[in-house]
Image (cartoon, grey):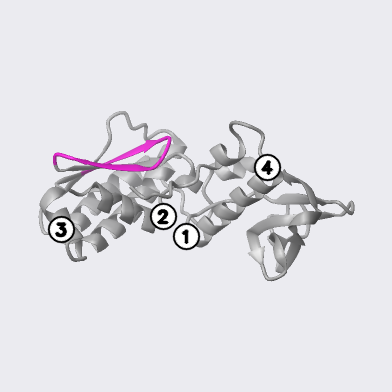
Amino acid sequence: MSPTRPVDPLECLGRGHVRSVWEVMEAMSILMSRRNEGLPLNLPQVTLYLRSGREVLGVLREYGEFRQGRGVLMNTSGGYGSRDEGMDVTFVPDGVIEAITLHDATVLATPAKSMPESSPMHLRRHLPAMADKLSTALGTPVTAEFGPGTDLDAATTVQGLAWLIERTGEVVSALANTPDTGTVLKEQVRKVRLFVGDSFQAKLTDGTLDLTTSRFPAAWPLDRELKMAVADTLP
């Protein structure tokens, strides 16, 4: 399993103890990084409240150390609700920030429109196609199924599985062509089962590779995380 667990946005931003301004900005920076790596994420706009009384509205691009010192880069926009991240980039030094507001944070719970909307019919059609792709890559018949209890009527389940089907086909096929790892995969994997749960995980038992993705788009596995997780299940 990858040592870096995919981020659950609700865990970072909406559960447990009250988070500091800087923890919230760091979580948002991680989410932006994950979007830049390919996850279809909707990110909420934020307002930074400065000690001077000014406000900066936009989408948090990055939080960390820069040449000018520690601070945050913002893609500034024309106004809350515009959904236009704008072309301007504003640097705000760490020391002048007093508070932060996340606007409509519920957008984190749904994938961006860049990901086509899926359906149970879509899943049932693409799961056998994934199995065929893996069978070709591994050089042996591989079956695929949804895990017991999978509710294909839940929207979060459908979209999460659509992502997992697509990325599993690509990542495991690529792994099959790598030295050592590919050989073990070809010897060990005969079935793939896909689940949706609280967090991403992978397990290999008696020839069955179980892959579980989170319900939340921000915690869906990136290709590098899926690759490492599958490799780590191998004996």
User: Disc 2 marks which amino acid?
Assistant: Leu
Residue drawn at x 35%, y 47% is: 122
Q: CA distance from mark 1 to mark 4?
A: 22 Å
Residue 104 numbered tag? 4
Upstream in sequence: badge 4 or badge 3: 4
On whether residue 40 falls in the magenta region, the answer is no
Left or right, 147 with respect to 36, comes to left
- Residue 139 position, x and y percent, is 11, 59
Element type where label 4 sits in the image: loop
Start and end of the magenta stretch? 192-206
User: Disc 1 marks which amino acid?
Assistant: Gly
Give the vertical position of 36 relative to 194 (above or below): below
Give the prevailing secondary structure in the magenta stretch.
Answer: strand
Q: CA distance from mark 3 to mark 1?
A: 26 Å
Judging depth in this view, the residue of 221 and 135 nearest the camera is: 221
Considering every residue shown, the one lying at the far bottom of the view is 67
Q: Residues within 10 Å of mark 3 (few under 14, many from 20)?
A: many
Upstream in sequence: badge 1 or badge 2: 1
Element type where label 3 sits in the image: helix
Give the vertical position of 8 relative to 228 (above or below): above
Cβ atoms at labels 1 and 2 below 8 Å apart? yes
User: Disc 4 marks which amino acid?
Assistant: Asp
Q: CA distance from mark 3 to mark 2?
A: 22 Å
Upstream in sequence: badge 3 or badge 2: 3
Upstream in sequence: badge 2 or badge 4: 4
User: Disc 3 marks which amino acid?
Assistant: Leu
Q: Which residue is tagged 2? A: 222
